[in-house]
Image: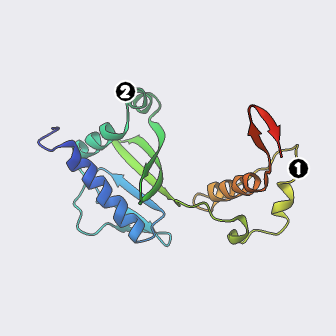
């Protein structure tokens, strides 16, 4: 029990926020002391219905749920720490805990459970050509939320799907 609540209560709170985030097809969930939880839906920040203003103690408890001692030390030293989180049947999430004005904040980006096919992303046809190269560097750039991680994941999926190499007893075949 922490602060009069069970750990499962804090996990339940976070799960309910993440469920609502996914229901609304939100790309991000923001938890910041002094405001209600906010979701980014269609590039606009909207409060999560039925939630209260977040207090510093709540954010400390949430950080304690997800960050081990090393990550907590990193947060205190560098004022920011990244981690990933996944919940079966709900989704995968990229999380950034940060210190702001002496309190803990959290930004969560939702990631799809399934990696989309490269062709479904609307990229130029020439994109696939780069995947045939064995040397060089591919840079994927863009603003936050523009699809860089999705593009990279889809490219890696395409490479892996095309690879007809398998290993048996440590020897390459195929």
In this view of the protein, which residue sits in the foreground, 130 or 38? 130
Q: Position of residue 134 (x, y in %)?
A: 88, 45
* Classed neighbour count for the residue bearing mark 2: other residues with Cα under 10 Å, few (<14), some (14–19), many (≥20): few
**In the rendered view, would you say 135 is above or below 131?**
above
- The reply, left or right, for residue 100 in relation to residue 124 is left
Question: Which label's residue is closer to the chain start, 1 or 2?
Answer: 2
**In the rendered view, would you say 16 is above or below 4?**
below
Residue located beneath label 2 in the image: 69
- The reply, left or right, for residue 65 in relation to residue 6 is right
Mark in front: 1 vs 2: 1
Q: Give the residue at x 50% y 69%.
A: 43
Determine the residue located farthest toward the left in the rendered image. Answer: 4
Q: Position of residue 130 (x, y in %)?
A: 85, 55
**In the rendered view, would you say 40 is above or below 88?**
below
Q: Which mark is residue 29?
A: none
Tell me the quarter of the picture where residue 25 sits: bottom left
């Amino acid at each position: 029990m922490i602060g009069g609540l069970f750990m499962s209560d804090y996990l339940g709170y976070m799960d309910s926020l993440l469920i609502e985030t996914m229901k609304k097809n939100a790309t991000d969930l923001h938890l910041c002391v002094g405001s209600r939880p906010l979701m980014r839906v269609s590039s606009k920040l909207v409060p999560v219905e039925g939630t209260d203003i977040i207090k510093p103690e709540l954010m400390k408890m949430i950080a304690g749920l997800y960050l081990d001692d090393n990550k907590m030390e990193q947060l205190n030293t560098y004022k920011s720490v990244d981690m990933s989180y996944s919940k079966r049947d709900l989704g995968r999430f990229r999380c950034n805990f940060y210190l702001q004005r002496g309190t803990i904040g959290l930004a969560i980006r939702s990631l799809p459970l399934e990696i989309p096919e490269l062709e479904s992303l609307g990229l130029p046809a020439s994109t696939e050509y780069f995947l045939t190269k064995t040397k060089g560097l591919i840079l994927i750039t863009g603003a936050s939320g523009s699809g860089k991680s999705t593009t990279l994941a889809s490219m890696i999926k395409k490479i892996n799907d095309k690879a007809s190499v398998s290993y048996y007893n440590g020897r390459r075949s195929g």
